[in-house]
Image (cartoon, rainbow, N blue to C red):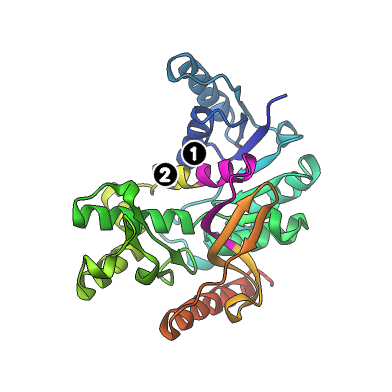
Amino acid sequence: MNKKIAVIGAGNVGASCAQYLAEANLADVVMVDIIEGMPQGKALDLSQAGPIRGYNCMVTGSNNYGDIKGSDLVVMTAGLARKPGMSREDLLNMNADIVKTAAVNIKKYAPKAFVIVVSNPLDIMTYHMRFITGFPANRVCGQAGVLDSTRFRTFIAMELGVAMADVQAMVLGGHGDTMVPLPSYTTVGGIPIKELIDAKRIKEIAERTRMGGGEIVKLLKSGSAYYAPAAATVQMARSILCDEKRVLPASAMLTGEYGIKDIYIGVPVILGANGVEKIIELKLSASDLKALQASAANYRGVLKEIGY
């Protein structure tokens, strides 16, 4: 029997996740969305691409949470984008309600699943998902660090004119303006970037990374990034389902690491068959540690706005 992945939300990010998951032949995929017909139509379209793209897994769509029953892994992408006239608090509370509904149904229909949260604000919604499901912390994590690190890698490769695959980078902290790019843990073919790019330019690239999502939003003028977020999510899903034990930055529950406790924030983890199998505690400079702790403190304040 094939493994099963549920994707909650069939918008751009959810549909792209479903596509990449199918093309990876990782598992059968079911997309769930409240918009009648949309997940079914996108799933049928993806199924018809299978003979050409070479995948054999089943892709289905549904408006019924009951169809996620028995899922091995759930990807949570559903959520609203901020609209004109909508306050930050309004958006936060509305997305919290969406995540709560999904969490209740995940607990009911897929009680043994691992959950990767993509909905924004990422670190807050990951905490919310874990609290509502009551799942062990190792089975609930957030996708952000992989995406942020990938953006850092891309900008460095563009700067140097080198293969993107040869650039390895690490970005910690919250998914947003408070993220913490780590040049000291960033290399090109094993060469520290400090030997290839001057400090001023590295700082500029790190700042572009912090604003990477916003840059895409401004260019699109309507909507936000979805190809890279989906690709990052699938890398995490593969590491869990295939027990790859990849070392990847993810939003994980800290229990004292980095001087931070009882909050989800981006840190390097080992992802394997048991989900978040280990949190890796890097030796950070005083300034980087302070920035990471400040990022966590910021999100702790936001959590209070939804009752935590």
Q: Are the residues flagged by discs 2 and 1 in contact, CB closer than 8 Å? A: yes
Residue corresponding to mark 1: 11
Seen from the viewer's position, the closer of residues 170 and 129 is: 170
- Compared to residue 8, the image places residue 270 above or below, namely below
What's the amino acid at mark 2? Answer: Tyr
Seen at 71% across and 35% down, the residue is 68
Q: Name the front one of labels 2 and 1.
A: 2
Residue for badge 2: 226
Could you give the CA–CA distance between mark 2 and mark 1, rounded to whole angstroms?
9 Å
**Residue visible at 43% across and 82% down in the picture:** 285
Q: Which residues are magenta?
A: 233-251
Looking at the rendered structure, the kind of residue marked 1 is Gly
Assign a secondary structure to mark 2.
Answer: loop
Above or below for 31 versus 140: above
**Rendering coords of residue 184 (x, y %):** 37, 71
Task: Let me know if residue 171 appears in the view.
Answer: yes
